[in-house]
Amino acid sequence: MTTIDIEPIGDLREYFPPRIDTYNIERFTESENPFAAVQAWKIHYQGYHDSGFVHTSAANEHGYLADSIDKSRGPHTDYLLAKNPDNAEDVATMRKINLAEGESYRALPAYGLSKGAITPEGQALLDWLEEQGAEIKELAALARAPNSNPMGAHELFREVIQAANGTQEVWLSTIVSTTCLSLMQSFGQRNFLSIGDNVSLDDNRVVEGIELSPVVIPAGNFIHNVALGYIEAVQSGNRLAVRSLGRSLVFLTAGLPYDGLPPEVAESVNNITNRVV
């Protein structure tokens, strides 16, 4: 077991940061709240357009992505909306796609989009995860409205990470390649396992040059992996990674109960919150 060489300073529970939620988070399916689902679809398009991923032609007459582009809708999709109670325009959204009973991960839209680019090693990993009984889902459609605060998307991500912590949940996802690199810097490469080559979309409604990276995200071990990356950065003297991973770890663990967390996580948070990073 890898630990940080620090002096113990008593009960670590008192040093865990409190969780502060700026946004109200709503969870629903299309059947439970069809009006909120449409709102999420529109935010999805607005966020992708504002980020330079798609052209205006990608939207239909209702103001959301055409069905031929957005494959992450349907009865097995869980939606999340983050709403700032003080600003109705400050909103963000994301989705998790669940498999129907008896379905394989091959039914997920991300797999269908990237299966031609998945390497033999990536395919073997997916097959192994399924054989081991991992709960494979798809993470999709993380976006925020134009001019909204990035914190809404951050709080959504923390919400799903904390909910999955310690479970067998694993996410398959296709992420815009530049965004994927940024996520790796923030949360570590262990949490975004490449399973294939980048995928180019042959669609003139998508901005030229946009590529998607197919990755596996070990959601149940995500926080632990951030802690391991932080420890490695401390030991190697990589101050940039120490700062980036340290901030991520404090944010992701905010409000979590101390009991049951791996020692690496507890010691890392203690180290961060009691020293200048």
Image: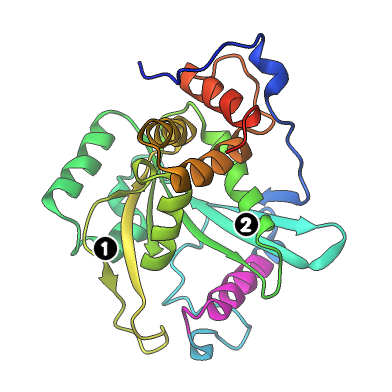
Is residue 209 positioned above or below 136 on the image? below
- Give the SS element for disc 2: helix
Q: Is residue 165 magenta?
A: no
Residue 40 is situated, as x and y percent measured from the top left of the image, at 64, 65
Q: Is residue 17 left or right of residue 268?
A: right
- Highlighted magenta segment, given as a residue range: 38-54
Q: Residue at x 42, y 18 (%)?
A: 3
Q: Is residue 78 left or right of residue 206?
A: right
Q: Residue at x 35, y 46 (%)?
A: 189
Numbered badge on residue 169: none
| Number of disc labels | 2
Mark 1: amino acid = Ser
Q: Is residue 45 magenta?
A: yes
Residue 180 is situated, as x and y percent measured from the top left of the image, at 40, 59
Q: Quadrant of the C terminus?
A: top right
Q: Is residue 135 left or right of residue 24?
A: left
Hey, which quadrant is residue 225 in on the image?
top left
Asked whether 48 or 63 is in front, the reply is 48
- Here the colouring is rainbow
The residue indicated by pointer 1 is 114
**Mark 1 neighbour class, 10 Å CA radius: few under 14, some 14 to 19, many 20 or more:** many
The residue indicated by pointer 2 is 153
Nearer to us of marks 1 and 2 is: 2
Asked if labels 2 and 1 touch by Cβ distance under 8 angstroms, the answer is: no
Mark 2: amino acid = Ala
Asked whether 202 or 251 is in front, the reply is 251
**Mark 2 neighbour class, 10 Å CA radius: few under 14, some 14 to 19, many 20 or more:** many
Residue 136 is situated, as x and y percent measured from the top left of the image, at 37, 41
Q: Residue at x 60, y 23 (%)?
A: 270
- Give the SS element for disc 1: helix
Measured Cα–Cα span from mark 1 to mark 2: 25 Å
Residue closest to the far right: 86
